Amino acid sequence: MELIDQQYIETPYYGSRRMVAHLRRNGHDINRKRVQRLMRFMGIEAIYPGPNLSKRRHEHKIYPYLLKNKEITHPNHVWSTDITYIKLTGGFVYLMAVIDWYSRYVLSWRLSNSLEVNFCVDGLLGALDKGRPEIFNTDQGSQFTSNEFLKPLLEREVRVSMDGRGRAFDNIFVERLWRSVKYEEVYIKEYSGVKDAKRSLARYFTHYNEKRPHQSLGYKTPLEMHSFQT
């Protein structure tokens, strides 16, 4: 699963067939059925034809994508969220985060040992304690199309935007965040358990927000961009 996760961060368009080919080229005798099972267990699939980590529930309302060719001009203009897989020594957890597109500031994050909606709602509420976006973008996963998740946004008159089917890169800033988190933190650590992961990730996100300069921000930190404009 760790090897699948590392390759998925590099090539999120790999489905089970390409993942099998990659693993076999690297000396792992594994069949497609097992790779499919592991990818389902991890909650990931290729960006085409579906979303990343969560299955859509067809009974839920799907909102249109509002950000095509849209210029993001200030903090709290657009926020977005997603979920990714985090390996532990004896298992795994899921990480969700809410990010501001303009400043790249991580407004909140949460860990969970399941893909139930509660930890996503908790993370959303944590972010909303710090402000309110004009637009909130998600994929079409069941966590984010659920009434429990959408209610706090609609009550605050936030416009909801959802990625098109098979278009994970509609949420590109979260995809870039996951790449940074994995290569700068997760892949170089061995978390002994959930508490260890939570402590280490807390340090990382403080560093990411307050000390890590971003080339795309003119080598300013997310905190500098978020504070300067608000």
Image (cartoon, grey):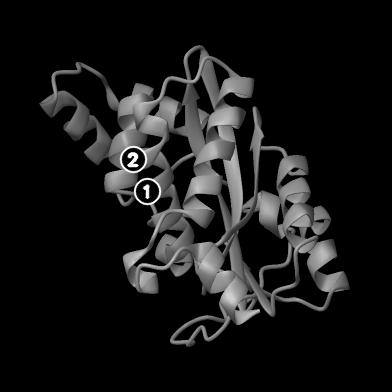
Where is residue 79? Give x, y as percent: 61, 68
Label 1: which residue?
179
Quadrant housing the C terminus: bottom right
Q: Quadrant of residue 198?
A: top right
Q: Quadrant of residue 81?
A: bottom right
Q: Quadrant of residue 107?
A: bottom right
Residue at 52% over, 55% down: 210
Query: At label 2, which amino acid type do we have?
Result: Tyr
Q: Is residue 70 left or right of residue 160?
A: left
Question: Is residue 130 or residue 91 the one in the foreground?
Answer: 130
Front residue of 224 and 130? 224
Residue located at (84% from left, 63% from top): 151
Is 165 drawn above or below residue 23 in the view shown?
below
Q: Position of residue 64 (x, y in %)?
A: 61, 77
The residue located at (76%, 76%) in the rendering is: 158
Could you tell me how many numbered marks the image carries? 2
Compared with 211, 43 (above or below) is above
Query: Mark 2: which secondary structure?
Result: helix
Identify whether 45 is placed above or below 99. Answer: above
- Give the left or right position of residue 199, taking residue 14 as reference: right
Find residue 183 and name its label: 2
Name the amino acid, label 1.
Answer: Arg
Residue 26 in view (yes/no): yes
Q: CA distance from mark 1 to mark 2?
A: 6 Å
Along the line of sight, which residue is nearer the eye, 162 or 87? 87
Task: Tell me the SS state at disc 1.
Answer: helix
Disc 1 to disc 2: CB gap under 8 Å = yes
